[in-house]
Amino acid sequence: MPTHLLTRRSHKPRPALPLMEGIALEQARVHEACGPARHSFALWLAAAAQAAAPGSVLWLSAAQGGPRLNPGGMAEFASPARFLFVQAARTEDLLWSMEEALRSGAAPLVVAELAEPPAMTPVRRLHLAAEAGGRFGPAPLGLLLTPGTGGAQGIESRWHLAPAHAPRPGGSPPPARDRPGFPGCWTLQRLRARTLPPRSWQITRTGAGSPLQAAPLPPGACGPAAARLPAALAQPPSPLAAPARP
């Protein structure tokens, strides 16, 4: 028969990295971001990590992955100079690199782009590594980027981000002044979390350099999800071309 031991020790909540008002992700844990704008979510989190702690953001991806991050698009959200990019030949090597980086605590945020959600065992190892990385300083945070609606087992929370920009009449592209760094709108959904219920927000930005604003959406409400890549992934055909916006 299982028993539960009582303790007089207070259960303090884990420190969390605030993303925007009313939204924060627990540190010393591994989270998951999915959806067509998941890379934008990762860049928002990178900007928050850069503002909260010194150190570089470590971004891991497969050697044969898709489009690479474009510094011109990244600069809208976070400083490209504070990123370290590592490519791994195999998924096993990528997860091992993420585990070692979290255990070291040298990077406040470690992002891993995966072709499919990982199983329970590697995610549990990542959690333990992230907890160990906070022994001598601020605890790091791990973020898994997965396609579709995600599905990594054992993660602390799962977030889905999709563009919700209003279409222009006739489907014409936005004028140059509207991209990048000008008004934008996204739908952010917390699909699951260990201690919090599912919830949705409308995320807006009124102009270049302005902060992101989160407005809670009623239960069941969800904006349109366009299946386009975020600005940071749109590689410009020439150095002078501005990256496209989701």
Image (spheres, rainbow, N blue to C red):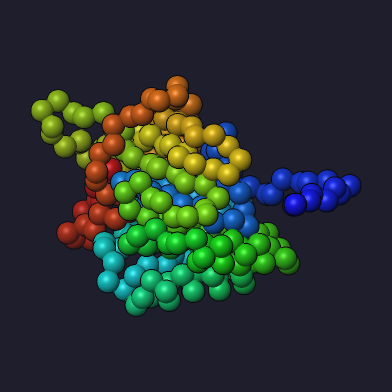
Give 127 or 25, whichever is nearer the viewer.
127
In the rendered image, the quadrant that contains the C terminus is top left
Residue ID at (51%, 65%): 121
Instruction: Report the number of discs.
Output: 0
**Residue 191 at x, y percent in the picture:** 45, 40
Residue ID at (26%, 61%): 67
Give 133 or 230, whichever is nearer the viewer.
133
Is 213 situated left or right of 235 in this image? Answer: right
**Residue 92 at x, y percent in the picture:** 42, 74
- Taking the image as drawn, is residue 185 in sight? yes
Is 193 situated left or right of 145 in this image? Answer: right
**Residue 126 at x, y percent in the picture:** 55, 64
Residue farthest right in this picture: 8
**Residue 49 at x, y percent in the picture:** 56, 54
Q: Is residue 210 above or below residue 37?
A: above
Residue farthest top in this picture: 218
Residue ID at (40%, 25%): 220
Give 224 or 182, whichever is nearer the viewer.
224
- Taking the image as drawn, is residue 55 in sight? no
Residue farthest front in this picture: 1
Residue ID at (26%, 28%): 166
